[in-house]
Amino acid sequence: MLRHGSACSVGFVPVFLILAASGSSAQETAARGVRIDTLPTGRIVISNPDAVGRGPAPSLVEELRVGSLDDDCSAFGDVNSLAVDHAGLIYAADAQTNEIRVFSPAGDCLRTFGGDGDGPGEFVMLAGIAWREPGHVWGLDAVRNRLTVFDSLGSTLATHSLGRSRSASLPWPMWVDKGAHLHIWNPGERRIDRYAPGPELAAVDAFPIPEVEREYYTSTFGDARLRMSARSPIPHSPDIEFTVDRDGEVWLANEATFDLHEITYAGDTLRTVTLRRPAPGLEGRERDSLAAATGLDEARLPQRKPALEEIGVGADGWIWVDTGERPIRAWEVFDAQGIYRGKLVSPVPIEPEPFPVFGAGAVTAVTKGALDVQYVVRLRVVR
């Protein structure tokens, strides 16, 4: 099975230009060392120095934790997808039970729906969820390759087949924009499909994810009776990362450089946000250990590690960048204008999967406690 972004990459050339700006906002960005330009195509390029300007950077505080060791609704088995609605209700998809659990903004368990099975409203492998106005919850079954639509109380409204496919994604990325369009990652076709509002599954258009060539190596494992081989990309070779924002625009980033590109479904680049920070080097003992672990000649390893990994855009337009530490300890954050606001350190380690939900001034994600027990936490941004 393909994982999110596993087979898609693209190369981008960073652009650093200077805007002859005016007004107080221009003075502030100049004081921060931010360089901005509008290209003849209309694309805006915001180039940020690897430093925060005047004033303290925002911080994160934990304000809610849901989970328990008891045999109840908040005892999670394997949360692999999260969603949050406009009222602050939290939806957690548990792959172990194939259930969708709903919690109030205060963390109280309100209801559970879904479950194991092949029938309407049931899942063989619940791989992703999304909430969409006016109150529909969408659940994706990775084995049956179908979508189930529930109302706000968990009643089944519709079931839609996505057609036959040999590819799946765990977890399965889905996004909803403010126009109530549903965007679903299609790993078999390497594209994001956009659907019209409503409980029907009416396709509108698609966004193909660009690719770059990646070098692969083959490793073998097993014993004399059963020898198997696996083909994998060379570690730290750059891949593509992507997400969809609340305006329905696609964001693409090549892991090799700290450049983020906002692109329409028609293919027009609206904005490029960069951080003038080189990718970290892959050298010394780390390089030697990786060569020994993979059996690769040291010369085949890349000279640098990825500059970034997962990216997300919040409901308020803030851009969140995960630079690859596992579990996630912090994000590099840009505000809605594309200005770098610094590193926001999480008070708890965050699991990269399920993908965190970035709201307006809050992050909803999963952390692990003692004995690897999962908890859903909400972190508030203090600005």
Image (tube, rainbow, N blue to C red):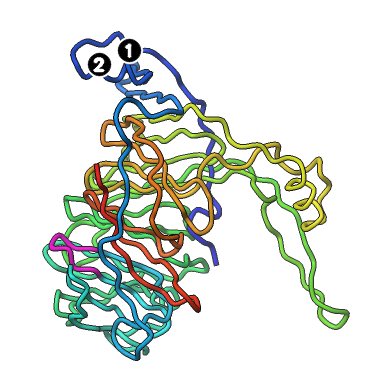
Please say if the residues under marks 2 and 1 sit with CB atoms less than 8 Å apart.
yes
Check disc 2 and report the residue beneath it: 26
Quarter of the N terminus within the rendering: bottom right
Q: Residue at x 37, y 41 (%)?
A: 251
Give the image location of residue 178, x and y in percent. 18, 50
Q: Nearer the viewer, residue 204 or 82?
A: 82
Check disc 1 and report the residue beneath it: 19
Q: Seen from this angle, which residue lies furthest right?
A: 224
State the separation of the CA atoms marked 2 and 1: 9 Å
**The disc labelled 2 sits on which kind of residue?**
Ala
* Magenta stretch prevailing secondary structure: loop
**The disc labelled 1 sits on which kind of residue?**
Leu
User: Which comes before the other along the chain, label 2 or label 1?
Assistant: 1
* In the rendered image, the vertical position of residue 275 relative to residue 33, given as above or below: below
Q: Residue at x 29, y 41 (%)?
A: 318
Q: Residue at x 17, y 72 (%)?
A: 104
Quarter where residue 109 is shown? bottom left
Q: Residue at x 30, y 73 (%)?
A: 66
Callout 1 crowding tier (Cα within 10 Å): few <14, some 14–19, many ≥20: some
Count of marks overlaid on the render: 2
Relative to 62, is 288 on the left or the right? Answer: right
Q: Which segment did they paint magenta?
A: 84-90
Give the image location of residue 272, x and y in percent. 38, 29
Tag 2, which secondary structure? helix
Quarter of the C terminus within the rendering: top left
Give the image location of residue 42, x and y in percent. 29, 21
Instruction: Tell me, yes or no, whether the highlighted magenta stretch contains residue 64.
Output: no
Relative to 127, is 357 on the left or the right? Answer: left
